[in-house]
Image (spheres, helix red, strand yellow):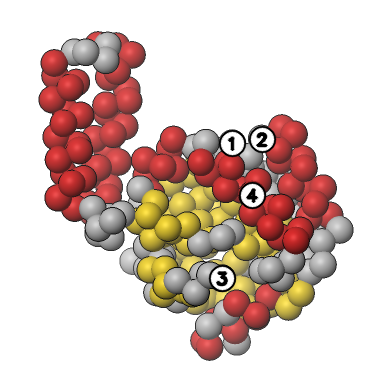
Amino acid sequence: MYLVIDNVLTGETLARAQALLADAPWADGRATAGYQSAAVKRNEQLPERHPLTQQLQEIVEGGLAGSLLFQSAALPRHIFPPLFNRYASGHDFGTHIDNAIRQTPDGAALRTDLSATLFLADPASYDGGELEVEDGSASHRFKLAAGSMLLYPATTLHRVTPVTSGARLASFFWVQSLVADAGRRAILFDIDLGIQSLRPRVGDQDPALVALTGAYHNLLRQWAQP
Ligand code: NI
């Protein structure tokens, strides 16, 4: 599933994140790359334990907690503490796959079911820097508004095309879902979207809506790995 979630950060919250990023202590992005991806990664990142990174993580985590669409689509069990990167002119990230398992800073292992990129710079302020995700013989390109996020399968090969002017700022992280199987997760998401759409039309107590909600939870009970 490739899901664009708009307005994860908006208004003052987005502006605060952008202000923090404006004079951030950027470091070499290869610090968090695996062996293969380090060879094709040319960008900058914020050090994971820097206090400014922690302030930014709280902002992004607040946006994720407030996004019903993210919660419904990802069914997050664990969210990797968001990281932040900057691609200036000449930077890119060649084709790679994200590591299947990541160590969180507190030492826990997280299985990466979903990858997420939250765009933080105005797309008119830089050229290039598209996130391109391979999907069989097709590929999808994304360059989203500041505050919008792409959620995509961590199983995919993907790259960031070269930035040729300006600077691309983003947050990126991974999600371990309660439901590891992408097909099952997609079915649950479809049912939940249907329930949300029906609710204002038929009311909370409509027997069919209650039954459908029950079926959703019973599927989740069967498929979730808490
Ligand atoms: Ni990646």
Among numbered discs 4 and 1, the one appearing first in the sequence:
1
Q: Which mark is residue 58?
A: 4
Among numbered discs 1 and 3, the one appearing first in the sequence:
1
Identity of the residue drawn at 28% across and 34% down: 192
Among numbered discs 4 and 2, the one appearing first in the sequence:
2
Would residue 37 be found to the left or right of residue 177 on screen?
right
Q: Nearer the viewer, mark 1 or mark 3?
A: 3
Determine which residue is flagged by label 1: 7
Mark 3–mark 4 Cα distance, whole angstroms, equals 15 Å
Type of amino acid at the residue the image marks with label 4:
Glu
Crowd around label 3: few <14 · some 14–19 · many ≥20 (10 Å): few
Determine which residue is flagged by label 2: 10
Q: Are marks 3 and 4 in contact (CB under 8 Å)?
A: no
Mark 4–mark 1 Cα distance, whole angstroms, equals 16 Å
Would residue 81 be found to the left or right of residue 214 on screen?
right
What residue occupies the far right of the structure in this picture? 23
Residue 1 locus on image (x, y percent):
36, 52
Q: Nearer the viewer, mark 4 or mark 1?
A: 4
Question: Front-most of 79 and 191?
Answer: 79
